[in-house]
């Protein structure tokens, strides 16, 4: 899907993006991530099932991603994510980012989990866009 690839290309270009979640008390939490991929036409990211982000997304599946590029463009992705586990998805993630093998070993590591956006919206913004998104992409 072209739109998903455009989002992935942007996030890969910036290198680090931030994922926002909410804890059980309603407090926001934001942390850096650096890996996304397309999985079955969906925007997906990975984490470890021992981390707080995993617990927070299971309790409240709404997540935002935000990133800013050197050329003054930023992205905000808002939506609902869904957990999935797949040896094939793990294999693809390890191929895309071989450094993950140092953390997870091989594709059979059960602590490596994936979330994909079930739905939501992506907005690209720029200082030149007069505080309006210059491109909005629905995630379905």
Image (cartoon, rainbow, N blue to C red):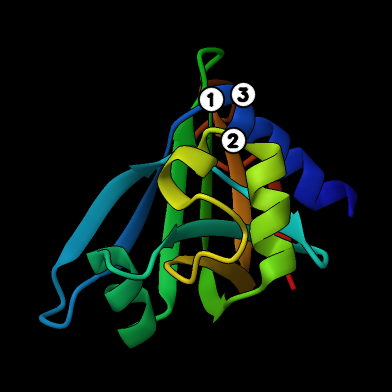
Q: Nearer the viewer, residue 139 or 126?
A: 139
Answer above or below: position of 104 versus 120.
above
Left or right of 81 on screen, residue 2: right
Would residue 98 appear left or right of 7 to someone viewing this image? left
Quadrant position of residue 88? bottom right
Which residue carries the number 1 mark? 14
The residue under label 2 is: 11
Would you say residue 119 is visible in this rendering? no
Which mark is on residue 13? 3
Q: Quadrant of residue 128?
A: top right
| Relative horizontal placement of residue 15, taking residue 135 as reference (left or right) | left
Label 3: which secondary element: helix
**Marks 3 and 2 close (CB-CB < 8 Å):** yes
| CB-based contact (under 8 Å), mark 3 and mark 1 | yes
Q: Residues within 10 Å of mark 3 (few under 14, many from 20)?
A: few
- Disc 2 vs disc 1: Cβ atoms closer than 8 Å? yes
Specify the farthest residue to the bottom: 59
Q: CA distance from mark 2 to mark 1?
A: 5 Å
Q: Residue at x 54, y 69 (%)?
A: 115
Residue at the (19%, 63%) spot, across then down: 28
The answer to whether residue 1 is above or below residue 8 is below
Q: Position of residue 96 (x, y in %)?
A: 69, 39
Observer-nearest residue: 69 or 111?
111
């Amino acid at each position: 899907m072209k739109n998903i690839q455009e989002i992935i290309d942007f996030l890969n270009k910036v290198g680090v993006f931030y994922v926002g979640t909410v804890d059980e008390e309603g407090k926001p939490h934001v942390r850096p991530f650096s890996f996304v991929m397309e999985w079955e036409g969906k925007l997906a990211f990975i984490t470890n099932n021992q981390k707080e982000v995993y617990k927070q997304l299971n309790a409240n599946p709404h997540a935002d991603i935000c990133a800013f590029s050197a050329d003054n463009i930023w992205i905000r992705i808002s939506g609902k994510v869904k957990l999935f586990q797949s040896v094939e998805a793990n294999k693809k993630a390890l191929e895309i980012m071989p450094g993950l093998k140092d953390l997870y070993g091989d594709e059979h590591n059960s602590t490596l989990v994936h979330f994909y956006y079930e739905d939501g919206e992506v907005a690209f913004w720029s200082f030149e866009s007069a505080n309006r998104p210059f491109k909005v992409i629905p995630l379905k």
